Image (spheres, grey):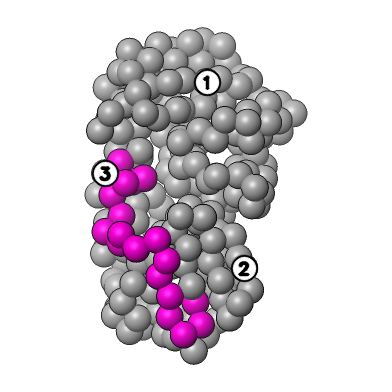
Amino acid sequence: MENKKFTILLVDDEPDIIDFLSYNLKKEGFKVVTANNGAEALKITKQISPNLILLDVMMPKMDGIETCQMIREDISIKQPIIAFLTSRSEDYSQIAGFEAGADDYITKPIRPRLLVSKVISLLRRISSSPLEEKIMSTNSVKIDRERFLIHVKGEEISLPKKEFELLELLVSKPGKVYNREQIMSLIWGNDTIVGERTIDVHIRKLREKLGDAYIRTIKGVGYTFQDV
């Protein structure tokens, strides 16, 4: 993976953290852009379309949760990977972040080697999908991987990255039941530590947007997509 191809937006209101992260990421060849608050981050994201945003949770003007939610809801934005930077480890904080559309969490204080490893792992997801077709469709659902859009019975729906990837996985093999371990490994990666409710949150969000009929829960096993 050529690091120089990727642009990372760092968003934090603490200059020391910005300087520390910028130094270590630039040293690895990444292009780094910075913002001091959520409002500035939203503006920059629209201008430069970063591949990855490292977003602090607690900030003035607009916190990380709100910023993430606004990015995910803006269909004009080419959706980046978003990882929260936080010193807060409470379950409710992680759940709120994933509901807003976050892909991952990185906990402060951050060790340089771990930071770089995590960033490379996150960026690898951009080109690691096993599905090569730009358009994938069933009788009622069409997935446009190039434009990052979903069409359900002709209605266009924009999804956050993780919801998109989860639906893409399920639709790739209608009727196949994916257990929670498979979903966690294929969508979040083996090196990602997330709360137990992460999959449940994303399934619930998908059902709210697509309708309840498409994703079935196989009790005690996992989830499957059914074309209706």
What's the distance in space between the residues labelled 3 and 1, CA to CA? 26 Å
Mark 3 vs mark 2: which is more N-terminal?
2
Query: Mark 3 — residue?
Result: 191
User: Residue 207 sits in which quadrant?
Assistant: bottom right
Asked which secondary structure carries label 1, the reply is: strand
* Neighbours of disc 2 within 10 Å: few (<14), some (14-19), many (20+): few
Callout 3, which amino acid? Answer: Asp
Residue in the image at 39% along x and 74% along y: 171
Quarter occupied by the N terminus: top left
* Neighbours of disc 1 within 10 Å: few (<14), some (14-19), many (20+): some
User: Residue 131 sits in which quadrant?
Assistant: bottom left
Query: Mark 1 — residue?
Result: 33
Callout 2, which amino acid? Answer: Glu
What's the distance in space between the residues labelled 3 and 2, CA to CA? 33 Å
Residue in the image at 49% along x and 89% along y: 228
Question: Which segment is the magenta one?
Answer: 124-141
Say if 104 sits above or below 143 in the image: above
Residue 88 appears in the picture as rendered? no
Query: Mark 2 — residue?
Result: 156
Q: Residue 72, percent across and down?
A: 60, 49
What's the distance in space between the residues labelled 1 and 2, CA to CA? 32 Å
* Neighbours of disc 3 within 10 Å: few (<14), some (14-19), many (20+): few
Q: Residue 42, percent across and down?
A: 66, 34
